[in-house]
Amino acid sequence: MGVFGSAASFGGAAVASYLPASVLSTIFGVVVILGALRTYTTPAVSEKKEISSNKLSYVLAGILIGFFSGLLGIGGGVIGIPIMLIFLHFDMLKAIGTSAAVIIFTSLGGSLGYIVNGWGQPELPPYSVGYINLLNWVLLAVPGFLAARKGAEIAHMVNPEYLKHLFVLLMFYVGLKMIGII
């Protein structure tokens, strides 16, 4: 998933560089809400279905996660977790953990895509490398990196079904906010 996600994320970033922010915001909101609806109907712990062993499913999942991650400028968890729950039959904790690992690849591919496609663009703020602002990156990445371990610890203490509901609520809120309803 990671390798194909990285390449697709680069492509998604290239497509995003040609679309207006309002279109990207609406696409993001709709995708997140659809993912939330589908995630809500999927059990957090999969007892009956075996995790997919079809390699093509993982390649396609990586491409989907990567493309939307690059297109929308996200790490991929909002897209990846529903895909892993629904199509690959992961349980919630395995989806969260795997998503965290895949995000490394999709973020790298997307970041490179935004650097290449934004290189030399006029009117970018100071400390920008392409469309990536290094000052904002540091201010977001450092606390995120430091909080990620604690978040993983908490996720293992919470009932997976509650975790799923919390994730779905967050997805609905973010999706509605991006569409402009909230």
Image (spheres, rainbow, N blue to C red):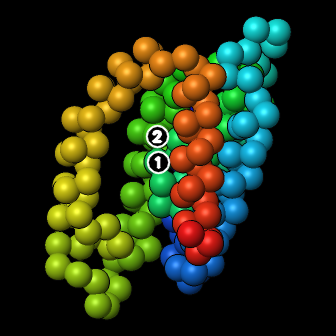
Q: Nearer the viewer, residue 157 or 49?
A: 157
- Mark 2 lies on a secondary structure that is helix
Residue 163 image position (x, y, % from top left): 55, 28
Residue 174 image position (x, y, % from top left): 54, 57
User: What is the three-letter code of the residue carrying label 2?
Assistant: Ile
Task: Kindly identify the residue that appears in the image at 81 percent across and 13 percent down.
Answer: 49
User: What is the three-letter code of the residue carrying label 1?
Assistant: Gly
Dot 2 and dot 1 residues touching (CB under 8 Å)? yes
Work out whether 113 lies above or below 25.
above
Residue 64 image position (x, y, % from top left): 68, 48
Q: Nearer the viewer, residue 7 or 76?
A: 76
**Quadrant of residue 71 within the rendered picture:** bottom right
Calculate the distance from the C-alpha at mark 2 to the C-alpha at mark 1: 5 Å
Q: Earlier in the sequence, mark 2 or mark 1?
A: 1
Residue that label 2 marks: 103
Task: Classify residue 174 as left or right of residue 87.
Answer: left
Residue 67 shows in the view: no
Residue that label 1 marks: 75
